[in-house]
Amino acid sequence: MAQLFSYWHSVRYHGGNCLGGPKLLVFVLLVSGILYGQGQPVEKISPDVRTIQKAVNDVVGTPIPGGGVLQVAKGAYLDGYGIVVSLEVAFDPPVNPFSPQKTPEEIRTTAAQRLKDVQEKLTNVLKQNVAQLESVGPAESVSVVLNILNTNPAYLPDLPSQIIFSIKKQDTAARVSLRQYK
């Protein structure tokens, strides 16, 4: 058994050709300093992004049993473009044998009304808030990407899967651009 580990004894006491002790520590510190020390400084999220996120969450965050906001608004500032906020919602809970039975017409009517309400509210929020944003330049935009989960595709085949609301800061008196995607 002593012979199996005899090379450790010779390296440790006779200073063999390996990095040991203080040499290894200095090497690791130098390499980690070179690799990780030259990163870009982390910037803070703009308060304007938080303002828009909160406004969108307040507008869309109405509770719907079994539905509602599936992913809260998350925003980012993009240099040269402006602020982009994304969230995911469901306008109606999925139909299942244990839920109260609704007719397909009731489901269509409910989803259409909620879609209309959300579009109106988000349009108003963008018109009201974009003019006060300091981090958004006059030629930049603010966009909200609303991802819609269709929980009842058999009853709602024409429900868009995504709506993008966009407004330029300099055009706040104008209309909000809406694009729908299936």
Image: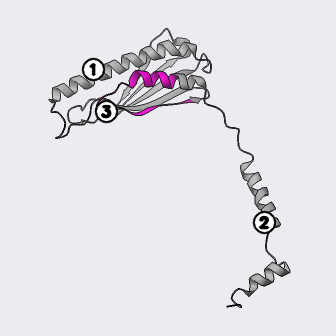
**Secondary structure found at label 1:** helix
Q: Which residues are magenta?
A: 52-76
**Crowd class of label 3 (few under 14; some 14 to 19; many from 20; radius 10 Å):** some
In the image, residue 128 sits, relative to residue 28, either above or below, namely above
Of marks 2 and 1, the one in the foreground: 2
Q: x, y (%) of residue 141?
A: 54, 21
The residue to which callout 1 is attached is: 113
Please give the label number shown on residue 24.
2
Find the residue positioned furthest to the top: 173
Instruction: Say whether residue 71 is left or right of residue 80.
Output: left
**Mark in the foreground, 1 or 3:** 3
Vertical relation: 13 (above or below) 115: below
* Residue farthest along the front direction in this orientation: 2
Mark 2 residue element = helix
Q: Which residue is mark 3?
A: 67
Q: Is residue 105 left or right of residue 14?
A: left
Specify the amino acid type for callout 1: Gln
Left or right: where 10 falls relative to 130: right
